[in-house]
Amino acid sequence: MAPAGGAVSLLAQARRRLERALDALVVGLFLVMFAVVLLQVLFRYAIDWPLVWSEELSRYLFVWLALLGWTLAARRRSHIAIEGLAQRLPDRARLGIGVVVQLAVILFALLLLGFGVQMTVRSLDVPSVTLFFGFGLIYAVVPLTAVLILLYALLDLIEAGRRLRAHGSDRA
């Protein structure tokens, strides 16, 4: 059996790989969206032959980018937060609020996952208007985002619990 330090190292490696893959996916989607919009403008105004599918594809890519961008913000803990009250509390109470917030995020992510899977499955056979794939692929970003948000919230919850225990052992 691997020592606890080895498990932490494997978890850190897995997290880094996930983060690199997510970063690459977001950059790739952005580049594709940029190219599609550029082609759309070029064909519409320079050639006077608009691409029918480009507007729809760029809209769906934007939705994917927005939801995956949410996971990047969750990973970096860069969401807008009102922290005026929390900053005035003692460290232990502030950590406790962090735990409660992460539990709320986990609950929301679980709800989003359930509804996202339902929405994706129900729309698997609904065709897109101008593209060659169905809405199931478009909606698949919802459960994917939910899983990623859930993962980051669990990791943050574990870290908050570790810090709470460390803060409690300092007082003992």
Image (tube, rainbow, N blue to C red):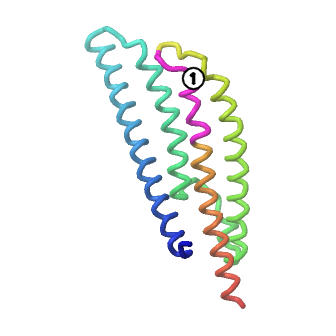
Q: Position of residue 16 (x, y in %)?
A: 44, 58
The quadrant in which the C terminus is found is: bottom right
Residue bearing mark 1:
135
Relative vertical location of residue 143 with respect to residue 106 in this rendering, above or below: above
> Residue extending furthest bottom?
172
Task: Please identify the quarter of the rendering in which residue 86 is found.
Answer: bottom right
> Residue extending furthest left?
46
Find the magenta span and give its range. Answer: 131-144
Callout 1 secondary element: helix
Relative vertical location of residue 26 with respect to residue 166 in this rendering, above or below: above
Q: Position of residue 88 (x, y in %)?
A: 68, 73
Is residue 89 located in the magenta-colored stretch of the structure? Answer: no
Residue at 70 percent across and 74 percent down: it is 89
Residue at 58 percent across and 56 percent down: it is 152
Give the left or right position of residue 90, taking residue 135 as reference.
Answer: right
For the stretch drawn in magenta, the main secondary structure is: helix
Relative vertical location of residue 157 with respect to residue 139 in this rendering, above or below: below
Task: Please identify the quarter of the rendering in which residue 170 is found.
Answer: bottom right
Residue type (three-letter) at the residue carrying disc 1? Phe
Q: Residues within 10 Å of mark 1 (few under 14, many from 20)?
A: many
Relative vertical location of residue 6 with respect to residue 145 in this rendering, above or below: below
